[in-house]
Amino acid sequence: MKEVEKPVGIFDSGLGGLTVFRELRSMLPGENLIYFGDTARVPYGTKSAEAVIAFSKEITSFLLARKIKLLVVACNTASSLALEEVRGISPVPVLGVIEPGAAAALAAAPRGGRVLVTGTTATVNSRAYSRALAGSGVKVAERACPLFVPLVEEGWCSKPVALQVAREYLAPFRGRADALILGCTHYPLLKKVIARVMGPRTRIVDSARTAAQAARDELAARGLLNPGRRGRSEFVVSDAPERFSALAHRLLGIRTGRVEIKRF
Ligand code: DGL
């Protein structure tokens, strides 16, 4: 296989990383993409750093064996806790979602403005976004929203309970942030309810798009872009492939076709 034809690997704890997959697919139609969702072990956001590192390394080894040319860690929790360890075992470049998310927030908030980071408990406790934004002149607050991931994985993004949960977490910040970072790849699926709670003066920053742009720039810089127009999409999960496929279609409009299963 020619270098450019090798797939780009993408992984997340479940289906949240499909928000990054969808951006990559529309931005780079010629790329072969392989997506791994760790549906047997989701959520990552409530687990220890040791567990997230071990899972991330297992998935990375699996994707490397599939001859990927670039790895996108499409999970904020894994990007916060395991990026260095994943880079340590990967001969191909590895991109996370924290830096692109922080860059997008800086573009959206004025200097001296206020940025609210939302994410899983593990991401917020790691302070990865606060570190990435340090010295940029914005004021950062962080809020863990642990019930958001199960709501998304249940497919309940537009039920009244989603708005109620969003109010519990975010009502105290209404009107008090210039930008809100959706610091979990599941959260773009709750963007409408989050925007409704935060009010019109908060820009909602979705790192999925900026992460996809970073991947495109990395491939271009290395001369690895696949110029074709009909790239292959493959999906692998660690459990319940039919459920993954049904939710991918219902929530993101993605038709996965057959989903492979890989148990660790
Ligand atoms: N979607 C992931 C993230 O970006 C993980 C959510 C979870 O598994 O808790 O953080």
Image: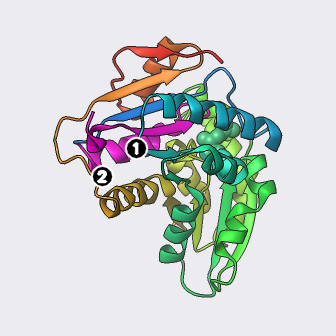
Tell me the residue at 69%/78% (across/down).
Answer: 134
Query: Which residue is under mark 1?
Result: 69
Residue 235 shows in the view: yes
Figure quadrant of the N terminus: top left
Q: Does residue 31 lie above or below 181 as drawn?
A: above
Residue range (magenta)? 1-29
Asked whether 191 or 83 is in front, the reply is 83
Q: Position of residue 261 (x, y in %)?
A: 52, 14
Tell me the residue at 57%/87% (across/down).
Answer: 111
Quadrant where ligand 1 appears = top right
Amino acid, disc 2: Leu
Q: Does residue 177 lie above or below 136 as drawn?
A: above
- Badge 2 element: loop
| Residue 190 horizontal side relative to residue 167, left or right | left
Tell how many labels.
2
Query: Which residue is under mark 2?
Result: 224
Query: Under 8 Å from ligand 1: the CB of mark 2?
Result: no
Residue 3 inside the magenta-drawn segment: yes
